[in-house]
Amino acid sequence: MIFLVDHFFEGKELLNRIPIRGKDKLIFADVTYEPKTTYVDKIAQSLKDEFGKVSGVIGIGGGSTLDLAKGVSLMMNNPGSSADYQGWDLVKVPGVYKAGIPTLSGTGAEVSRTTVLTGPTRKLGMNSDFTPFDQIVLDPQLTANVPANQRFYTGMDCYIHCIESLQGTYLNEFSKSYGEKALQLCQKIFVEKDHWDDESDEQLMMASYAGGMSIAYSQVGVAHAVSYGLSYLLGTKHGIGNCIVFDKLEEFYPAGVEEFKKMIEKNKIDIPQNITAGLSDDDFDKMINVSLGMKPLWENALGKSWEKQMTRDKLRKLYERL
Amino acid sequence: MIFLVDHFFEGKELLNRIPIRGKDKLIFADVTYEPKTTYVDKIAQSLKDEFGKVSGVIGIGGGSTLDLAKGVSLMMNNPGSSADYQGWDLVKVPGVYKAGIPTLSGTGAEVSRTTVLTGPTRKLGMNSDFTPFDQIVLDPQLTANVPANQRFYTGMDCYIHCIESLQGTYLNEFSKSYGEKALQLCQKIFVEKDHWDDESDEQLMMASYAGGMSIAYSQVGVAHAVSYGLSYLLGTKHGIGNCIVFDKLEEFYPAGVEEFKKMIEKNKIDIPQNITAGLSDDDFDKMINVSLGMKPLWENALGKSWEKQMTRDKLRKLYERL
């Protein structure tokens, strides 16, 4: 069994709780940057070289580590590079057994059917029915010491999932019931409550899970489509990237953005501004290409005729405001 | 692949939608009475006699049919009688692949970790990690023509699951978030809304699913413990049995019972009264024995010292009121 653990935990007490036995191996995942297809391929290849086959991969960490674990599991059994499978339903063979143990709440990576990876030409996940974990462990104690800023950025990923799912054209009753519950929990934690306690950790963990379940059968929307371009070019991390973008989406999600601004104020969070200042035309084109490649996200957000509404020109203006 | 279909659908249009191929077999499940261990054993044995092994069992129907399908799947791979596995975590070997397609909403059998079976000495499920379905299909169109009374009784099974889970001592944040969502959906459908439409079918289907998820990691309570005794002796069906019992549980669930009575009135439902009139001491003893055997249910409802609170005498008085 391969334990893929967020490098944040190197030397930390959590390691004593991991039951390494026999030929089990612990690998620290370097998530300084969000996971790249080259990194997934490298870990999978090194495991094949060392063991031939493995019994399973257990990811312990935030969304990046969980996505890495899902990717490595799939690439133990699928030929080629993980970059070949960036897209929807390109994976044809199940991976090895995989389990996820989140130590950050919000991304929903513990239940999503994707692994968000930066590849040679795009930032896009291996979206497939074979991508979700076989088992997950939800232990809110593991999220107890996350710094408040990080907690907020990742928590807002969940909040934004809900808004994008609930206002999307792909919505169905399954996604709706999960999205409503996750939204309600986010509001309880970030709007209504005046302090952070163990219950907040528990509720944010369930919000993350429910938000992930909501988008598993619907789709995310404008904030994700735009922030993927940002991450691709500038390496902006997913949580904060979503916040930077969502902050400017009053045209698409007026009520959500209004509440989001309240949460920023109440929780005393700084959202970086002017991060695209000074970028070249070529840079903007790269971001626009990555973003407009996320067709299902745009279709979910704006309907079948989304291309008429979101032109390259309009998207450029949006990127310039970030 | 074995399709186990509620006998209600004999001659109905639904059969045309079942993609029978090759050596697939369709079996109509006789659910005139709730499933018995002898019936599970009989179906499993006949499949072994005819095919040796099967690829999987797909249950299509209400809670009884789904529980039958789960039981048959398990008994294809486990020795002895299903009665040997009535209890908690007695099943040690996974069953064959199993899928569930509910045609009634409320029981949560599509996601529960039990199969409620009437055996030689008890009414109790095969509760185990191997019991849940591998896959489920939620299609609210399949529930569109359920008669209003039946829909209410089965829907109330879900409502009661939520109350028992949310007020139970086993509650955790996972069960709570699902229980709250299911309860909210039930209230929307049965309290707030004035008519029944497609959205009601969709929402009751999600309520059933969420209610089932809620008790999967917590437990049910007094209404279920008492109604199991009723079903065991009198064959009272689960949905209506729960209603008969819950109607008299104001001592344990005051707010829930009050709202339940409102829903009965609003939806113009008759709850049978005096169904235990004329029973012998021996009959009452049988019901009390079955009921008090459900230790986890009582412990969830009343805490560790439940035996001091729910004496045989007190339970007898409760049964006499039904």
Image (tube, coloured by chain):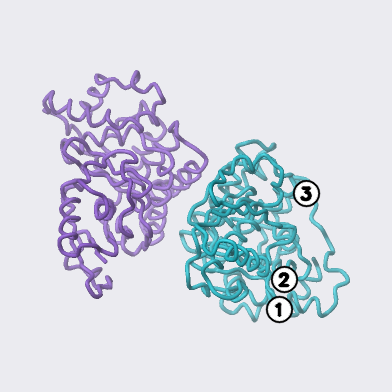
Chain colours: A purple, B cyan
Task: Tell me the residue at 80%/76% (across/down).
Answer: B283
**Could you say whether the residue bearing mark 2 is in a helix, strand or loop?**
helix
Label 2: how many Cα within 10 Å (few below 14, some 14–19, many 20+): many
Task: Tell me the residue at 31%/45% (across/down).
Answer: A91
Amino acid at dot 1:
Asn
The residue to which callout 3 is attached is: B269
Amino acid at dot 2:
Gly
- Image quadrant holding the N terminus of chain A, namely bottom left
Of all chains, the one bearing label 3 is: B
Across and down, in percent, residue B312 comes to 73, 80
Of badges 1 and 3, nearer the viewer stands 1
Dividing the picture into quadrants, the one containing residue B72 is bottom right
Q: Is residue A1 visible?
A: yes
Dividing the picture into quadrants, the one containing residue B215 is bottom right
Across and down, in percent, residue B78 comes to 53, 71
Of badges 3 and 2, nearer the viewer stands 2
Judge by depth and name the residue closer to the eye, A20 or A220: A20
For the residues beneath circles 2 and 1, the answer to whether they share a chain is yes
The tag on residue B229 is 2
Q: A36 left or right of A170?
A: left
**Could you say whether the residue bearing mark 3 is in a helix, strand or loop?**
loop
The residue to which callout 1 is attached is: B289
